[in-house]
């Protein structure tokens, strides 16, 4: 019966809410229609169910059989444990069994499986080469749990007398899709951003524990609200300021992610927290979460794994003491559903239809309502089924890749390694890896984490060594201690073999393949393992000898990257992105989408690729700070985040196994880069620079227009180009009508650069000090709503040479766009001196001056009798005119409004880091002239080319315009600037991957083999370019 290719799908019976399926109708269709020869699946029989997320008829439509009788099936799939009477003999089953840790409540199920000579595969134990579970619903648990928590908060706050936007949210299961639920949360976020939250409950602080998929999913929902993340150390300051606000409404919520170092401290005050030491010796640490974190938390979202040997996150006694002191804690969502675990008073599970209970600390009592004192708590153990459709699709996408192997193979030892390791029982006998289960059933103290049991398999580690451990590994937690040491050091392990002693005196034995990317790290791991195998004399008392383990270390192996399987129909390409700035996400999204259905059409059309070969692009985002890279790739498939210091060549070579790799950058091609041209050619690689917006898309649009004119034997008479990154009209809500999405220092300095251009045959030079005064009014006829001005942008003449029109064009001008009025204000501010970079004596004093002192110094206002009137807007404008910084009263008023808007007249101290007027101004601009989470920026690029055709004696005016606005995606605003810089970079990488760019050496995107396909892909991807000829 095993291996007959007939698959059964169980009707879920464990819980009325369980609507998930292991395979959706679309998965079944692909498996059946591809043929048994390819998939290993002959038939699929589905037990009828009236509550399943997909109707029975949908399975019938794709060729499945609907029947209660699964006796023909060699492999039977479910989600949760089936009822015991549903277990058929001599079959293979796959579901979440929760038996590998010898969980007492599921031992009758295991006994039934053993008695019926069944083979059992546990989804929880199917682990990929990266050491992570392949089949899991963690993110969906986090998403659903967070939405349900927000809904509960709305109800709880109402019972406390506060109406909040949270009240309009439904439970997760009430929405037809995850997207609809997210849209509802975004609406709540918009209401918070516009209407605010009552100050009486603020600051509203969400504390997240853990960093796995559950926490990531919960944070994904949280980030849809207007939010700010704060470090744990800043909570007291934030809480103190929040409680003292005079405003009646607060327009954001706060998030704080805590790890073990924020939860405990060493009992020895002279010692700092050490993760390896904490995992090995938790008894050396005291809990501090209740002192350092919980007093400031409004909500705790518990997503972390916990073992009983560790201190609790929050005990009943601790919450009682906090409650007496007026702790603001309102709600707890224990998404891990660890009953009586890290949060002691969460002593019961809750259900989807009744997700909360109220715990009253002072009376130590529990209530099933929202009214009264205490904290509301949620502990639903079946959260992912609230998004049954998406969770099933996600699950089936992975399961369908190897279900054929399970269905068509009778001998489990012939399965791929990751499936063999997931087989707990074969033919009624426990497999080698799980022979420890009978021993564990006799022990009440044994508790091995999922990760430890599964092993963290990572075949890509550069160095590995086989380590044999023998001794009391499980009953004394020494296996946990050993594995924690490996993990804490950044290593990986693969559990090769595991045998558990069957009596108190018996020894256990395990073989671990331990890996690390750094030989020194591996040496450190072995040293640490040796230390627990050979305790020091001080610790080696006779009573503790049972804790000792024996350790044998094999030979060090150096491994390389495995080649892709020749049978894999997709060609896999790897792209490394260095840095995790704003432009990274759009680039990452485009590249990671290659090979998906969404990209297939434009990919084939734009690249004229008739080949049936498929290609997947895997993107690695590397950053000095891992958290930044992880935030970039969140929600993007085919991506990975790594921590990397590019100055560490050894670490860099880990990702660039050999040099001679193509490079794409948005940076300028300068002399140092041009010097690498010959070396790049000799190495057979391309270095493609200036592949962003400006420079980048501007080059490509210009060369397309110029070359088209030249092909028609036209002569370029005039080339003018204008580009600007500015706020959208709705976001241009300050006196300057300008905001910074990046550090303002660069933009301010650019406004002081000299400029050169050619107009009607004459070369014009503009000094840097006069640049703002040279701005002129500018309008685009097809965009009459935009009142703009332009400033000359550096040396335009170099572009005449670059574009090959220097000898023919009488006008060559490149300008920077701003809203009208910007330059006259900036010119006035420059004359006042607020952009001066020299150290200001006033700012060198130990006693820090205020911004008002600083302003008075610049405006030469006597500060002896200073009062509000002296530094008001009207007087500032008058003083500007008196000092001759501008001649127009209207401009002086605008400059004064800008000064006041920036807070340069306020009585707050200037930070010590500000030693010059320029630094003070940058500091204030960075604070006051930034985009909010919901505001859009705008990019406008406009070319005008006048072409003379001598043969026909006609003149044509060609224009090309790009107008792009920032886009909200998954609750996050992607700026237009990031989009128009990141997408071209990604397109450049794509063109090199598919070998559309064959020229080697240092290139700009001014050659047809680059700009023609690049512009076509950009437009197909959604960047609109408007072209017109008059």
Image (tube, rainbow, N blue to C red):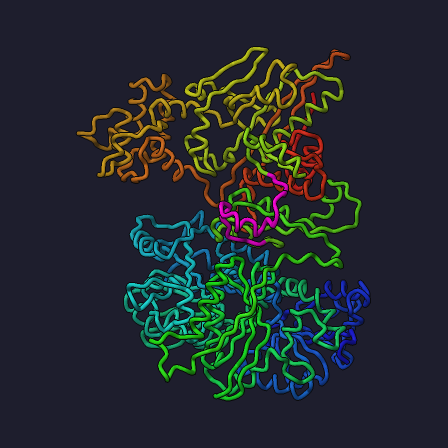
What residue is shown at x 60% (from left), y 27% (from top)?
A: 942
Q: Nearer the viewer, residue 633 or 228?
A: 633
Q: Is residue 549 above or below residue 593?
A: below
Which residue of the protein is positioned furthest toward the left in this rendering? 864
Q: Nearer the viewer, residue 500 or 344?
A: 500
Q: Quadrant of residue 287?
A: bottom left
Q: Is residue 286 magenta?
A: no
Q: Position of residue 421 (x, y in %)?
A: 63, 73
Q: Nearer the viewer, residue 861 or 74?
A: 74
Q: Position of residue 381 (x, y in %)?
A: 53, 72
Q: Position of residue 801 (x, y in %)?
A: 62, 20
Q: Quadrant of residue 81?
A: bottom right
What residue is shown at x 48% (from left), y 77% (from top)?
A: 550
Question: Is residue 386 in view from this perspective?
Answer: no
What residue is shown at x 65% (from left), y 86% (from top)?
A: 114
Which residue of the protein is positioned furthest toward the front in this rendering? 555
Which range of residues does the magenta coloring cover? 640-664
- Quarter of the image that includes the C terminus: top right
Q: Nearer the viewer, residue 697 or 332?
A: 697
Q: Is residue 209 above or below residue 850?
A: below
Q: Is residue 110 above or below residue 870?
A: below
What residue is shown at x 72% (from left), y 48% (from top)?
A: 600
Total numbered circles = 0
- Quarter of the image that includes the N terminus: bottom right
Q: Position of residue 966 (x, y in %)?
A: 55, 40
Q: Is residue 66 left or right of residue 874?
A: right
Question: Is residue 538 in view from this perspective?
Answer: yes
């Amino acid at each position: 019966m095993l291996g007959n290719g007939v698959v059964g799908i169980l009707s879920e019976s464990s819980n009325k809410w369980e609507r998930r399926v292991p395979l959706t109708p679309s998965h079944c269709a692909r498996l059946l229609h591809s043929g048994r020869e390819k998939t290993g699946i002959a038939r699929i029989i589905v037990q009828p169910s009236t509550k399943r997320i997909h109707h029975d008829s949908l399975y019938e439509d794709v060729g499945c059989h609907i029947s209660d009788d699964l006796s023909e099936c060699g492999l039977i799939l479910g989600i949760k444990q089936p009822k015991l009477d549903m277990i058929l003999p001599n079959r293979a089953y796959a579901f979440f069994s929760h038996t590998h840790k010898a969980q007492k409540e599921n031992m009758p199920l295991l006994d039934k499986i053993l008695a019926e000579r069944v083979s059992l595969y546990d989804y929880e134990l199917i682990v990929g080469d990266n050491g992570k579970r392949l089949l899991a619903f963690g993110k969906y648990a986090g998403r659903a749990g967070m939405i349900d928590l927000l809904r509960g908060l709305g109800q709880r706050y109402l019972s406390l007398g506060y109406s909040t936007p949270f009240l309009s949210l439904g439970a997760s299961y009430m929405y037809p899709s995850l997207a609809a639920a997210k849209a509802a949360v975004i609406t709540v976020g918009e209401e918070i951003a516009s209407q605010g939250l009552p100050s009486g409950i603020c600051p509203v602080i969400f504390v997240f524990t853990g960093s796995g998929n559950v926490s990531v999913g919960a944070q994904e929902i949280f980030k849809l609200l207007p939010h700010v993340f704060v470090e744990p150390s800043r909570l007291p300051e934030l809480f103190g300021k929040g409680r003292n606000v005079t405003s009646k409404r607060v327009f954001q919520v706060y998030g704080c992610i805590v790890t073990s170092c924020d939860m405990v401290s060493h009992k020895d005050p002279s010692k700092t927290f050490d993760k390896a030491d904490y995992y090995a010796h938790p008894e050396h640490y005291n809990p501090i979460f209740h002192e350092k974190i919980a007093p400031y938390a409004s909500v705790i979202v518990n997503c972390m794994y916990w073992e009983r040997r560790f201190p609790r996150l929050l005990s009943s006694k601790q919450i009682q003491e906090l409650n007496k002191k007026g702790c603001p804690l309102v709600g707890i969502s224990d998404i891990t559903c660890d009953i009586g675990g890290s949060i002691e008073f969460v002593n019961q599970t809750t259900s989807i239809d009744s997700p909360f209970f109220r715990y009253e600390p002072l009376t130590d009592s529990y209530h099933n309502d929202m009214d009264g004192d205490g904290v509301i708590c949620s502990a639903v153990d079946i959260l992912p089924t609230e998004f049954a459709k998406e969770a099933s699709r996600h699950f089936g996408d992975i399961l369908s890749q190897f279900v054929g192997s399970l269905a068509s193979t009778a001998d489990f030892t012939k399965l791929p390694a990751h499936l063999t390791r997931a087989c707990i029982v074969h033919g009624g006998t426990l497999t080698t890896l799980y022979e420890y289960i009978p021993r564990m059933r006799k022990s009440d103290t044994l508790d091995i984490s999922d990760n430890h049991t599964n092993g963290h398999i990572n075949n890509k580690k550069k160095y590995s060594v086989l380590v044999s451990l023998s001794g009391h590994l499980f009953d004394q937690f020494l296996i946990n201690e050993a594995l924690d040491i490996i993990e804490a050091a950044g290593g990986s392990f693969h559990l090769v073999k595991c045998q558990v002693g069957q009596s108190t005196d018996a020894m256990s034995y395990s073989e671990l393949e331990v890996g690390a990317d750094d030989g020194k790290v591996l040496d450190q791991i072995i040293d640490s393992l040796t230390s627990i195998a050979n305790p020091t004399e001080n610790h080696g008392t006779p009573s503790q000898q049972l804790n000792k383990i024996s350790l044998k270390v094999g030979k060090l192996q150096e491994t390389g990257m495995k080649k892709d399987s020749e049978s894999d129909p997709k060609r896999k390409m790897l792209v490394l992105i260095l840095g995790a700035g704003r432009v990274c996400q759009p680039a990452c999204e485009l590249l990671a989408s290659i090979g998906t259905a969404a990209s297939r059409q434009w990919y084939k059309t734009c690249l004229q690729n008739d080949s049936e070969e498929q290609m997947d692009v895997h993107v690695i985002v590397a950053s000095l700070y891992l958290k930044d890279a992880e935030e970039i790739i969140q929600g993007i498939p085919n991506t990975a985040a790594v921590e990397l210091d590019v100055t560490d060549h050894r670490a860099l070579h880990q990702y660039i196994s050999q040099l001679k790799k193509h490079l794409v950058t948005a940076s300028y091609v300068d002399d140092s880069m041009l010097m690498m041209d010959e070396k790049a050619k000799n190495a057979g690689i391309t270095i493609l620079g200036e592949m962003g917006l400006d420079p980048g898309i501007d080059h490509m649009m210009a060369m397309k227009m110029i070359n088209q004119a030249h092909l028609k034997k036209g002569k370029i008479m005039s080339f003018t180009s204008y580009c600007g990154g500015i706020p959208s009209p709705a976001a241009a809500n300050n006196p300057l009508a300008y905001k910074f999405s990046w550090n303002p220092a660069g933009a301010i300095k650019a406004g002081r650069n000299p400029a050169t251009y050619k107009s009607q045959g004459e070369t014009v030079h503009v000094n840097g000090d006069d640049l703002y005064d040279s701005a002129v009014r500018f309008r685009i006829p097809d965009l009459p709503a935009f009142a703009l001005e332009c400033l000359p942008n550096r040396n335009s003449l170099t572009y005449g040479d670059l574009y090959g029109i220097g000898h023919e064009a009488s006008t060559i001008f490149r300008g920077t766009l701003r809203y009208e009025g910007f330059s006259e204000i900036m010119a006035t501010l420059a004359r006042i001196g607020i952009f001066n970079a020299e150290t200001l004596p006033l700012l060198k004093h130990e006693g820090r001056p205020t911004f008002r002192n600083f302003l008075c110094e610049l405006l030469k206002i006597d500060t002896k009798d200073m009062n509000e009137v002296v530094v008001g807007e009207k007087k500032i404008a008058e003083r500007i005119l008196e000092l001759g910084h501008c001649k127009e009263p209207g401009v002086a008023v605008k400059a004064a409004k800008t000064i006041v808007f920036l807070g340069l007249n306020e009585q707050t101290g200037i930070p010590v880091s500000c030693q010059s007027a320029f630094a003070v101004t940058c500091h204030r601009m960075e604070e006051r002239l930034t985009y909010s989470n919901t505001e859009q920026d705008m990019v406008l690029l406009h070319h005008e080319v006048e072409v003379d055709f001598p043969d026909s004696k006609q003149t044509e005016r060609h224009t090309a315009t790009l107008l792009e606005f920032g886009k909200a995606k998954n609750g996050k605003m992607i700026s237009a600037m990031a989009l128009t810089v990141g997408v071209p970079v990604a397109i450049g990488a794509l063109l090199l991957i598919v070998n559309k760019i064959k020229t080697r050496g240092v290139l700009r995107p001014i050659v047809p083999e680059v700009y023609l396909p690049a512009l076509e892909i950009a437009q197909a991807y959604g960047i609109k370019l408007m072209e017109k000829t008059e």
